[in-house]
Image (tube, rainbow, N blue to C red):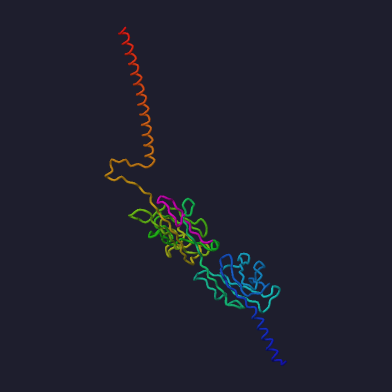
Amino acid sequence: MEPITTLVIFAVLAALGQAQFAPTLTVNSCTASKLQLTLENAADGGIIYIQGQTSACKQTTSSASTVHEFDFASCGISWASSFKMIVQKKALYQTGDDKQIPIMCIMDLTDLTVANNLNALDKDDDAGQNLTVKPTASMKLYRSGIDIGGGSVQLTDSLTMSIELDAEFQADFDIVARECTASTINIISASCAADTELFPDFTKPAQGYLANNFGAFRTTDLNGGSVAMTFSCTLTVCQGSCAAATCSNGGSGYGRKKRGIMKRQADAAPAIDDISVGTTVTIAAEEVILQTPDEDTDVCMNRGGFVAVLIITIIVLVISLVIAVYMGRKYHEKKDALSKLNGGMTSVAMG
């Protein structure tokens, strides 16, 4: 066999051997606490791990499609930093066939860039994967500790509004309510209450959590009945703790301060993104029965008063009946006594 032919055969075999190991990695989700990815066409008995970390970040691979999860705290990975995911064909040793995929999990923010980090990686077998994650939050309304979102309450009820970042974002991010409305009513403007008697400033019991206690209210409806009120807020997201705005009413509103008017706290993180939350509740008013001019002689009373009057009437009737029976008996007894007396006198006269 000619030397050139032998070299060609070896080159073909080497190429085939390398082509046989072509795993595909797809990032499914990436939060502040963990990374989830799907790995396909890896080797049975191989390994996947984050380079430079402990065995806590190492997992066994399979040739079938498998889902792998990596905890950032255990792996010592800081969110929004680039790292290499290694897919290794053999668990005991490394070869040139092993794959290195650069990964970075980033927020949907304009002030974070990843180009320089990815370009610094020395071996990119696959294109780097950057997963953009937008923080999420929820708004809920409570009456006496019960979630009444989408339900109905009375206009006289006291309500509690809570706005909270989802659990995976609470450790690293904070929120403030920048603008809020209740249907067409403006209740929060520039992070401060528009009317504290109607809706006071938010309080912040914990990072990533806002609360507000207020009396139920609704837009004016001349027809009465029930009115659906949609509460919505635009939230500003901060890395770390957000600053509190000094409001004209002397209170503190948790939001972005007006430039040139309010000085940002030294330890407060800059605002980096806006998200929206909302919920709807129906506000009903209690019916009040009023007496019309044509009914001046009628007695208008509630059910309890009617029952009380009915009971008193029955008692009076019973007492009257008892008195009538008693007086009837007395009358008959007196009549009988007179009859007997008259009969005795007649007998004496005849004798």
Location of the C terminus by quadrant is top left
Q: Residue at x 63, y 65 (%)?
A: 74
Answer with left or right where residue 18 lies relative to residue 284: right
For this orientation, the residue located farthest to the top is 351
- Spot occupied by residue 5 in the image (x, y as percentages of width and height): 69, 91
Where is residue 300? Give x, y as percent: 33, 42
Residue name at image x 67 percent, y 83 percent: 14
Q: Residue furthest bottom?
A: 2
Task: Name the residue nearer the viewer: 4 or 347.
Answer: 347
Tally of numbered discs: 0
Residue at the farthest left position: 294
State which quadrant residue 68 falls in: bottom right
Which residue is outermost to the front?
350
> Residue 263: horizontal and vertical position, in percent?
46, 62
Q: Nearer the viewer, residue 303 or 139?
A: 303
- Magenta span contains residue 186: no
Closer-to-camera residue (316/195): 316
- Locate the N terminus and report the quarter of the image it occupies: bottom right
Where residue 182 sits: x, y (%)? 40, 59
Q: Which region shows up in magenta? A: 148-166
The answer to whether 250 appears left or right of 54 in the picture is left
Q: Residue sitting at 35 percent across and 41 percent down? A: 301
Image-quadrant location for residue 229: bottom left
**Left-right relation of 47 to 338:** right
- Tell me what residue is drawn at x 54 percent, y 63 percent: 169
